[in-house]
Structure formats: C-alpha cells, structure tokens
Image (cartoon, rainbow, N blue to C red):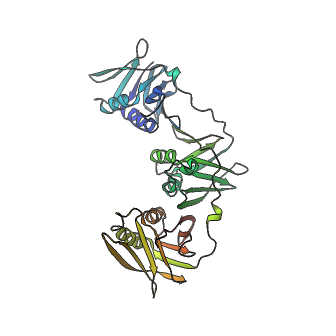
Amino acid sequence: MRFIIQRDRLVHSVQEVMKAVTSRTTIPILTGIKITATEEGVTLTGSDSDISIQSFIPIEEEDNEIVEIKQSGSIVLNARFFGDIVRKLPMDTVDIEILNGFQTIIRSGKAEFNLNGLDAEEYPHLPIIEEDQTFKLPADLLKTLIRQTVFAVSTSETRPILTGVNLKVEDDELICIATDSHRLAMRKAKIDNNVVGSYSVVIPGKSLNELSKLLDDTNELIEMVITENQVLFKAKNLLFYSRLLEGNYPDTSRLIPNESKTSITVHAKDFLQAIDRASLLAKEGKNNVVKLTTLERGIIEVSSNTPEIGKVSEELQAESIEGEELKISFSAKFVMDALKALEGTDITINFTGAMRPFIIRSLHDDTMLQLILPVRTY
C-alpha cells in the first residue's frame, strides 16, 4: 500500500474516527485505526465495539486532488501515535507506504517516521446493515434532538436501559425520550418518513454524545438506518455505527400528568439565573435542593437554606400564576439542565402538588417537554 494525501484532510478524518477509539479495550487491535486505500480513496475506521466510525477521503473533491493512490492495500496503526504524528508533520502532504510485512513509513518533507503496523485482516468487521428501515433528518435537527434529551439519561448501570435515549418513530413523527427515573426529557420532531409502521429503539447516551460532536450545524440530511441491534447514521463521507441497548424501555407516557393545580409562566433566563444564585449555598448539601414558593401578586420566591452555611432567598416577578398556592423543593441542577435545553424565552411550569412530578415547557413550542420529580424536604 502506498498513497500521498493532503495532511489537513487526513488529520480531520483521524480526529473523527478517534472518537470511537479507546485505550481501555480488551481487544488490542481496537487501539488502532484501520486505514484502507482503494482506487476510490482512503477509508479510516475506528471502533471500541460499541461505537464504530468510518471516515472516507475521496481521491478528488470539486476538481481538487486530495489523495494520490500508488498502490491499494490496508493496515492498522496505533491510533494515539499515528494521530500525534500526522498532526505534527511539517508539510501539507503526507506519503504513507507499507514496506515488508507491516512496517509503515510516514514521510512529510524531511521528516520520516517508521511505525509498526498490524494486520488489517485481524480488525473486526463492521456490522452488515440491511437498509430496509431508514429515514432522513437534517444534521442540525439531529444535534438539537440529542442536546435536548441526552443530558437526562441515567449514569448508573443498575438499569442499563435508562443509560440510553429511547427513539420512537410513529407515522411521520420522531420522538426522543430520556429519563434517569428522577427526571425526563422529551422532544418530538416531524420527519419525512417513508417507512411504514412504527418502531422503538434505545441508543446509548454515550454514542449520541459522540455523534453530536461529529455533526455540523447544517441542514445536510443524515440518513438513519435501524436494525435489531445496531443503528447507522450516514453523513457525507462518514458512517457512524452504534450498538442498541437490549430490553424494553419503560412506558413513560403514564408519568406525564394531564392536569395541573398550579401553573406559572415565567421568563426562562430570569428563572434560570435565580435558581443558579439560590443553588450557590445549596451546593455543599448532598442534594443541592432549592425551594420555590408562590406569593401574592404574581411573585415567586426562590430560596435555599443550608443550616451550617447560610440561606438565600430571591423574589421573581412571574408573567402569570394560576391555581393553588404552592411550596415545592427540587434539585437545582435538574431544573437548570431542563431550562438550558428548552429554547423558549418564556416557559410554563405546571405543578400537580408538592410531591408530584412537574412539567416545564416552552410557552410557544409544544414539541418539547421536561419533567422533574420534586424532593421531599420535610
């Protein structure tokens, strides 16, 4: 194998596939990046057996030559060393050649590295995915869906299914739900779905975080392909595979209350900042609890009290308060996470009592919902 390639493009592709490579793997070859050169171009692959990322560099793009293939072939090179080398090479082009066995020469300008490679035949094959269940959605929308839900997945392995985001397709609607059993984030989006029928899968939160870093904020269409145990996201020159979590995701629809006893509409930014200030003294406590009390004339009080440190209270003018008086305590972090995910200037919070879950929504956007369980403080 031998090819000459633009260094910037190689660095970019190496950084993309590195997101799937981990040093903590039980399969030694997975600490490497697989490089394959064919007549079409160069393909880089990284995997940790949960996530696999494949980045393709075509021979030319918009009449610019990117790669010159002298001889096709493949090799696996240590990801960390190879990544560091290509990033620090002196010239704009890189010449990569495999000599006898798996000895790999990397040249650029006057610099020459000799790196020991591994047999690419030993590298695990990527899953073969039959493309019968597919749909497309814009990259920026996919990024938003991930950002507005993935923070609510569970970090505890006691219920592995909750460490993922439940992705449901029903007719032409995509629904993403994440919950750690103390809070829930849900976001819906319309999609052009040519698939008949509905399906529901659970994608690990970790996979979605890595995918989100790879996506651009453009309306380029990303194709999603779903099978029994894998999901594949296809972008231009990029394939992102993730395993799916096994098991049934809990039915969360019954958690969401239909009626409310107290409803508050408030400016999201003001509310977020007031909770942030109230949590300054609550941080030391083990549960970071902030209390909300409704007062007369549309005023809400946000307060926190940690006996050994001190207390804080702040009054905030709401746009409106309807229904019963309320005193409720909750995790400041959970509410702040929820408010950061909502993209409205004004939000409505619906309460059904001090010990029942409450719902935060954007005032003018019903595609999104955040649900939080209060904290018992008495």
Q: Which quadrant of the view contains residue 18?
A: top left
Q: Relative to 52, does residue 283 appear above or below in the rendering?
A: below
Q: Quadrant of the N terminus?
A: top left
- Residue 153: x and y in percent read 52, 54
- Residue 240: x and y in percent read 53, 39
Q: Relative to 360, does residue 243 appear above or below in the rendering?
A: above
Q: Which residue is drawn at 45% across and 79% down?
A: 293
Q: Which quadrant of the view contains residue 276?
A: bottom left
Residue at the extreme bottom: 297
- In front: 293, or 46? 293
Q: Residue at x 45, y 35 (%)?
A: 21
Q: Residue at x 53, y 75 (%)?
A: 354
| Left or right position of 263 against 171 | left
| Left or right position of 135 against 326 | right
- In front: 205, or 232? 205
Across the whole image, how many numbered discs are drawn on residues?
A: 0
Residue at the extreme top: 100
- Residue 358: x and y in percent read 54, 70
Q: Relative to 322, does residue 65 appear above or below in the rendering?
A: above
Q: Which residue is drawn at 55% across and 79% down?
A: 262
Residue at the extreme left: 110
